[in-house]
Amino acid sequence: MSEALHAEWTKLRTLPGTGWLLLGVVAATVIISAAVSASVSCSSMAACHVDVTKLSLTGTYLGQAVVAIVAVLAVSGEYGTGMIRTTLAAMPRRITLLAAKAAVVTAVTLAAGIPAVLGSVLAGRLILPGHGYTPANGYPALSLANGTVLRATVGTVLYLALIALLSLGIATAVRDAAVAAGVVLGLLYLFPILSQVAGSPGVTRHLQQIGPMTAGLEIQASTGLRTLPLSPWAGLSVLAAWAAVALLAGALVLRLRDA
Amino acid sequence: MTATLTPERSGRSPEADGKDSFGRLVHAEWTKFRTVRGWVIATVIAAALTAAVGLYAASGPQTGCQPVGPSGPIGPPGPCKPSNPVGPGGEAVSDGYYFVHQALRGNGSITVRVTSLTGRSSPPGGGIVPGPDPEQNFTSALQPWAKAGIIVTASTRQGSAYAAMMITGGHGVRMQYDYTGDTPGLPGAVSAASPRWLRLVRKGDTLTGYDSAYGTHWTRVGTVSLAGLPATVQAGPFVTSPAWVQTENSGPTVATAVFDHVSLPGGASGAGWRGASIGAATAGNARVSSSLPGRFHAAGGTFTVTGSGDIAPAGPGPTDIGEAADDGFVGAFAGLIVVIVVGAMFITAEYRRGLIRTTFAAIPGRGRVLAAKATVVGSVTFVAGLIGAAPIIPVGASLLRSHGNYVFPMSTLTEVRLVAGIAALLAVTAVLALAAGTILRHAPGAITVVIALTVVTYFFSVPLAVLPAGAADWLLRVTPAAGFAVQQYVPAYPQVNNIYTPQHGYFPLAPWAGFGVLCLWAAAALWLATVLLRRRDA
C-alpha cells in the first residue's frame, strides 16, 4: 500500500496542472467568500437576518468545482494518455490502486481546503464588522472558539474532501475526463436549480435533502437549524453516502472492465 | 509541406472551389459527429433531459390560496382557481378600482379637478381584519402608483379597453390606456393649493387627454386610438391604489381622492352618477385579491372617492399568484451541461487522439475547420433544443392548469420565440464550449470554465440569492449567463409595483439583448480560438 501511495503521490505531484488547480481552489474559495462578505450590509438589527457563518463560506460553491476537476484529472488523465495500462501492470491490485488514489487526492484536497476555508472565515471575521455585522447588532466576530463556527469550518473542509471522493468515484466509473466533469458538475449544481422551481414545498425540501451539494452544505448553517431540510451532520452524511456509492461504482467498474 | 499532404481530389484542390468545399467541410465534420456514438447519445439525452426535467417542474406546483371576502378572509387556505382578466392586447391584467360612472353616448368629453390624494396601507405581514372595517389596522401611506382621475372605458367588465387621465401618488399626471400604455403629463403632487385639472375628449375611436394646473390653459398629454370602442361608453372619476410589495410579501392599500368641477358636457346621459367597485374581492370571488371594495360620497358637487387595486398589466411576483410557464425551461440547465460537454469534446477529442493533425493535413484552412465544427455542433444542438423545449409550454402549461394553477397567457408567436430562444441558447453555448475547448485543448478545463460562466453564474445570481440585487443583475448582464434572459416572456413595466428580480422571472436585460451578450462571448471566443489555431502547432 505504501508503494502504491508513493507512486500515486509522485504522479499527482508531477502533473503540471495540479499545483495551479490547488492554488485555484484556495483563490476561488477565498476571493468569492471575501467578495460576498464585502457586498452585504446590515444597518440595523431588524434589517439583517443573515447566517454570517454560511455567508463567509460562500466561496465553497465555486471552490468545490475546482476540487472536482483535480479529482477527475487524477483518474481520467491516466485513461486519456493510456498511462493507466502501465499503472495497472505495475500495480495489479486494482482496489489498492483506487484506495491509494483516494488517499492521495483526499490529502491534497485537505491541503488546499484547509487554507481555503480558514482564509474565508478570516476574511469574514475581518470584513463583516465593517458592514454592520457588529456585536452591537447581535453578530459577534466569527471565531473558531465558537462551537457552531468551528463545526461549519471543519465541516466545510470535510465537505470539500467528500466532493473530491465523489468526483474520483465518478471519474473511475466513466473514465472520460470530459464526461466525468459534466456528470459531477451537473450533480452538484442541478439539484439547487431544480429545487427552486419544484413548486410544492415538499418536493423542494426533498430535492434539497437528496442533492449532494444542498445536503452537504447544511454543515455550514448556523441559524434556523430547526427549519433546515436536514440537520448539519445528517446533511454531510448524505454527501458521504453519495461519495461512497460513487467510489463503489468506480471500484466495480475498475475491477470488472478492461483498462 | 502542407501541399504535399493535401490529397488530390480529381484534380481540384479544396481551395479552388469556394462554397462547395465549405459544404464538404461541414459534411466531413457532420460525419465525425454522427459516427461517435457517445455524442449522438448525449445529444438525445440533452433533448430528453430538457423536456423531462421541464415537465417534472411543471407537474409539481399546486396553488393554495385563501378565499377573501369583502371584509377579509372567509375560509381556510386551500386549492382554488385564481385567474387574471385578459386585456385588449391578450396580456394578463389587474383591473380593480372604484368607479363613479355615467354612460357617455357618442362623442363628448369629461373634465374634473382633483384637489387631494391620500392613501392608507395595510401593515407588513398581512393586515386585513375580518369585520365591518377591514382597514382598521391600516396606516397612513400613499403608494407612488396610487391613481386618481377620470377614465373612459368600453364597459365595467374587467379587461375592457380604456383610456384614463390621472394624478398619481408619486409620478405626477399620467395618461394611461389599455393597461400597458403610459405617457407622463404635469409633474408634482396634488394638493388643495396645487390642484390638477384633467380632461378626456372622445371623438370616434380616438381619445385625447389634457391636463392643466388652473383649468384655463390646457396641455395635450396624448392621443390614443381604441379600435372598436362602442358608441356608448362608461365615463367618470376613478380611484385605485396598488398593493405594496416586498421581497416575498404584499398587502392591499387604499387611496382617497377629492374631485370637484366634475362635468360631462356633450353626450352625458341624464342618469345620475353610480358607484361601483370594479374587480374587488367579493364573497363569491374566491381569490387572493389586492383590491378592497371602495366607496364614494358626493356633497355639493364634491366627490370623495376611495378605491383599491390597480389598472395595469399583471405579471409574476409577490402580488400575483400565477405561475409563469417558463419555469419549465429549468430543464434547459440539464440539457445545457450535456451540450457543453459535447461541444468541448468535439474538438478536444481530436487533440487527444491526434486526429487533429490528419484533419489539418486534409484541410489546411484551420479557421474554416473551426467554422465547420461550429456549424455542425450549433445546428445539432439547436435541433435537439427545439425537440426538447417544444413540449414544455403546451404540455407544461396544461399540467399546471390541471393542478388549479393560473398560467400567464402568451401568444403563439411568444411561444415560438421562447422555444427558439431556448434552442438557440443551447446552440450558442455549445459553440462557446467548442471555442473554449479549442483555446484550452483540454476538455475538463473547457467544460468547467463554460459551466462556471453559465450555470454556476446563474446559480449564484438566482437560486443562491446571497448576492445583493445589484451584483446579481450585473452578473446577468455581462456574463454568458445573460443568455438566460430568453426565458422571460412577461415584460417588466416601470409603472407597475412589483419585485422585478430573476427569482420572479424578470431578467435585467431584454430577451434578445441577453442572448446578444451570450453571442458576443461565443464570437469573441471563436475569434480567439481561430487566432490560436493558426499560430500554434496542432
Image (spheres, coloured by chain):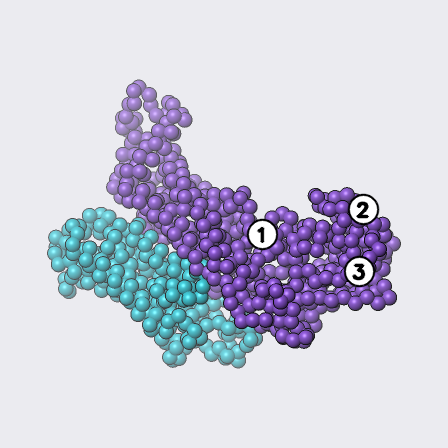
Query: In this figure, which residue is indicated by the disc labeled 2?
Result: B107
Q: In the drawing, what numbered circle is on residue B311?
A: none
Label 3, residues with CA under 10 Å away: few <14, some 14-19, many ≥20: some
- 3D distance between C-alphas at marks 2 and 3: 19 Å
Query: In this figure, which residue is indicated by the disc labeled 3?
Result: B273
- 3D distance between C-alphas at marks 2 and 1: 34 Å
Q: Give the label, 1 or 3, closer to the camera.
A: 3
Chain letter, purple = B
From the image, which quarter does the C terminus of chain B lie in? top left
Label 1, residues with CA under 10 Å away: few <14, some 14-19, many ≥20: some
Residue B87: % across, % down: 63, 51
Chain letter, cyan = A
Q: Label 2, secondary structure: give it.
A: loop
Chain letter for the residue marked with disc 1 in the picture: B
Query: In this figure, which residue is indicated by the disc labeled 1?
Result: B491
| Amino acid at pointer 2 | Asn
Chain letter for the residue marked with disc 2 in the picture: B
Residue under the point 16% across and 60% down: A95
Q: Label 3, secondary structure: give it.
A: loop
Q: Earlier in the sequence, mark 1 or mark 3?
A: 3
From the image, which quarter does the N terminus of chain B lie in? top left
Q: Label 1, secondary structure: give it.
A: loop
User: Looking at the picture, does residue A179 appear above or below residue A196?
Assistant: above
Residue under the point 18% across and 55% down: A254
Residue B351: % across, % down: 29, 42
User: Cβ–Cβ below 8 Å for labels 2 and 3?
Assistant: no
Residue under the point 34% across and 48% down: B45
